């Protein structure tokens, strides 16, 4: 419980210093030669050996069912030495935004802590924020959790989705609109007409999901011309977007989605600091990468895991999270990060990037969470201690 308190305090402390952040990437270790796969939400829950999620204030890892959060500021203290959050020992999925941490358990329940101004804890809670883990209402069969800037979603055992939180653009898939003062009324609502979901991610006002059939469905604010044409007045209803067919592993920051199609990274949305030279409004855009297996994006940058076990990063250069010794705020195209061993998975968040080897060694670069008011910037990968 003390660590849950520390996490929530860090989230609140970051509120004035950092913009809201999207569902932060989750890295699940996979065999090096595995091709990109999507999560089979209908399959029995199997605990992955390791999962990593990052926000501006903290880094959290799911290790053998427990969730440990810290800053990695002390190079001699592994993240696993931090007390586990909330006493949970059967976590199967974690998700973070700048202000919220959510944990899905093997029992199918979801527990969240942090900011609740828009009911994004889904607990019918009157408080504007909480330092304790609270159980999300009406969720009993969750398998994966995704946390956006102001709303969250759970992929359920039956392949359907329930979402909760801020809903002014119908991004939760519901017609219900709560004002900020009615947060104690907010509870999850199942998204209608959506089945077989494999991956889901959220921006401020839009949610998109990919299915086991490699279809992409979006609801809420339309970011593509095709979505705008199809949705009409029913913008809370999921819309299949043919222009996004065959995309896997969708991920998002606060305004942009990215996924992988046939080794190519395809992004759509605002793309302000993520895509070189912006992006054409209303249309998806491909980045100059042709061998990607996975892509993960944070507010100002993204990274791709390539089929030769290297990592390529793109976006804003100011934080060092691209793994290059650059200065300024220029948005840069993809380039391979030098100095890494063969990599099997990646995670990005806040102003950092991390890469994971098959042996579960973790290398990170960028601007680390502040410790005692001091930031630590590494423009090249350094090995960090996550495990004892």
Image (cartoon, helix red, strand yellow):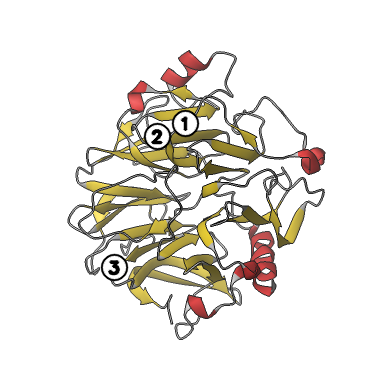
Which quarter of the image is occupied by the C terminus?
bottom left
Residue displayed at 78% across by 49% down? 125
Q: Count how many numbered circles sit on residues in the image.
A: 3
Residue displayed at 46% across by 66% down? 367
Q: Disc number at residue 357?
A: 3
Q: Looking at the picture, how far across and down is residue 360, in whole percent?
A: 33, 71
Q: Looking at the picture, how far across and down is residue 212, in whole percent?
A: 36, 36
Is residue 353 something one can see in this rendering? Answer: yes
Establish if 131 lies above or below 152: below
Q: Label 2, label 1: how many angstroms apart (C-alpha)?
A: 7 Å
For disc 2, the marked residue is 211
**Foreground of the two, 380 or 289:** 289
Q: Label 3, label 1: how many angstroms apart (C-alpha)?
A: 33 Å
Which quarter of the image is occupied by the N terminus?
bottom right
**Mark in front: 3 vs 1:** 1
For disc 1, the marked residue is 195
């Amino acid at each position: 419980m003390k660590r849950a308190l520390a996490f929530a305090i860090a989230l609140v402390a970051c509120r004035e210093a950092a913009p809201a952040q999207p569902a932060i990437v989750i890295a699940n270790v996979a065999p090096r030669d595995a091709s990109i796969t999507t999560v089979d939400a209908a399959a029995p829950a199997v605990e992955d050996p390791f999962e990593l999620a990052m926000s501006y204030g903290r880094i959290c890892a799911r290790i053998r069912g427990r969730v440990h959060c810290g800053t990695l500021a002390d190079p001699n203290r592994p993240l696993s030495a931090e007390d586990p959050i909330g006493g949970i020992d059967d976590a199967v999925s974690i998700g973070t935004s700048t202000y919220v941490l959510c944990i899905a358990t093997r029992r199918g329940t979801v527990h969240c802590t942090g900011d609740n101004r828009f009911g994004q804890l889904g607990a019918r809670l009157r408080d504007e924020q909480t330092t304790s883990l609270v159980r999300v209402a009406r969720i009993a069969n969750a398998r994966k959790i995704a946390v956006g800037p102001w709303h969250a979603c759970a992929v359920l055992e039956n392949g359907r989705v329930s979402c909760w939180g801020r809903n002014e653009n119908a991004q939760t898939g519901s017609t219900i609109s709560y004002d900020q003062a009615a947060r104690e009324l907010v509870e999850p609502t199942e998204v209608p007409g959506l089945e077989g979901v494999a991956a889901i991610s959220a921006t401020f006002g839009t949610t998109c999901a990919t299915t086991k059939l490699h279809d992409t469905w979006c609801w809420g604010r339309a970011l593509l011309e095709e979505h705008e044409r199809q949705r009409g007045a029913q913008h809370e209803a999921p819309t299949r977007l043919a222009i996004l067919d065959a995309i896997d592993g969708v991920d998002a920051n606060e305004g942009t989605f990215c996924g992988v199609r046939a080794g190519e990274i395809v992004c759509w949305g605002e793309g302000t600091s993520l895509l070189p030279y912006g992006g054409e409004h209303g249309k998806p855009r491909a980045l100059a990468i042709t061998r990607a297996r996975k892509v993960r994006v944070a507010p100002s940058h993204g990274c791709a895991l390539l089929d030769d076990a290297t990592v390529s990063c793109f976006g804003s250069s100011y934080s060092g999270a691209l793994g290059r010794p650059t200065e300024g705020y220029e948005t840069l195209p993809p380039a391979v990060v030098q100095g890494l061993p063969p990599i099997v998975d990646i995670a990005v968040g806040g102003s950092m990037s991390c890469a994971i080897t098959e042996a579960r060694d973790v290398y990170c670069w960028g601007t680390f969470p502040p410790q005692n008011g001091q930031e630590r910037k590494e423009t090249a990968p350094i090995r960090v201690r996550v495990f004892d």
